[in-house]
Amino acid sequence: MSNRAIISTPNAPEAIGPYSQAVKVGNTVWISGQIPLVPGSMELVQGDITAQAERVFDNLAAIAEAAGGSLNHAVKVNISLTDLGDFAAVNEVMARYFKEPYPARACVQVAALPKAVDIEVEAILAV
């Protein structure tokens, strides 16, 4: 695929497996799931779900910027939580990172996430 661009930025965590931070084809960007890892140190954020969600959305924003856009270019966001009891707190954080009109979204509870974190979020952008 000659029009496929790999997006990578040091302002978000390195991929911890055989994947890219994001892939851009045309004006569509698929951002891989982000967990609350601090770029550079690759340490997990300590703190409650609010602190974890803020780190995740900061990571997503950095990748969106590297792809030539912002989180306001998101058309679809997928959130995975290990506890849907965290849903309201994550909504509060998300509302600080996105402006209306908000993207489409799914939020599901999962049994486990990488590195035993409580949240993972992926996004699709149209830039």
Image (cartoon, grey):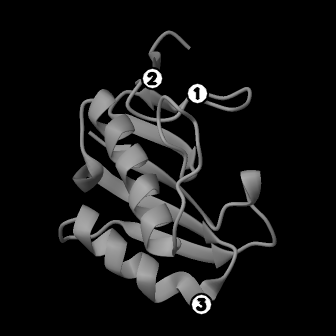
**75 or 1, which is in the foreground?**
75
Residue 94 % position (x, y) = 34, 70
**90 or 50, which is in the foreground?**
50
Kindly identify the residue that appears in the image at 33 percent across and 38 percent down: 62
- Furthest toward the left, the residue is 100
Q: Quadrant of residue 50?
A: bottom left
Residue 111 % position (x, y) = 81, 72
Left or right of 100 on screen, residue 71: right
Residue bearing mark 1: 20
Report if residue 67 is visible in the image: no
Element at label 2 = loop
- Furthest toward the top, the residue is 2
Q: Quadrant of residue 1?
A: top right
Kindly identify the residue that appears in the image at 75 percent across and 72 percent down: 110
For mark 2, does the 10 Å Cα neighbourhood hold few (<14), some (14 to 19), or many (20 or more) residues? Answer: some
Q: CA distance from mark 2 to mark 3?
A: 33 Å
Residue 61 % position (x, y) = 32, 46
Residue 8: assigned label: 2
First reached walking from the N terminus: tag 1 or tag 2: 2
Relative to 112, say whether 6 is above or below.
above
Q: Which of label 2 and label 3 is nearer to you?
A: 3
Kindly identify the residue that appears in the image at 33 percent across and 80 percent down: 92
First reached walking from the N terminus: tag 2 or tag 3: 2
Residue bearing mark 3: 85
Q: Circles 3 and 1: CB distance less than 8 Å?
A: no
**117 or 69, which is in the foreground?**
117
First reached walking from the N terminus: tag 3 or tag 1: 1
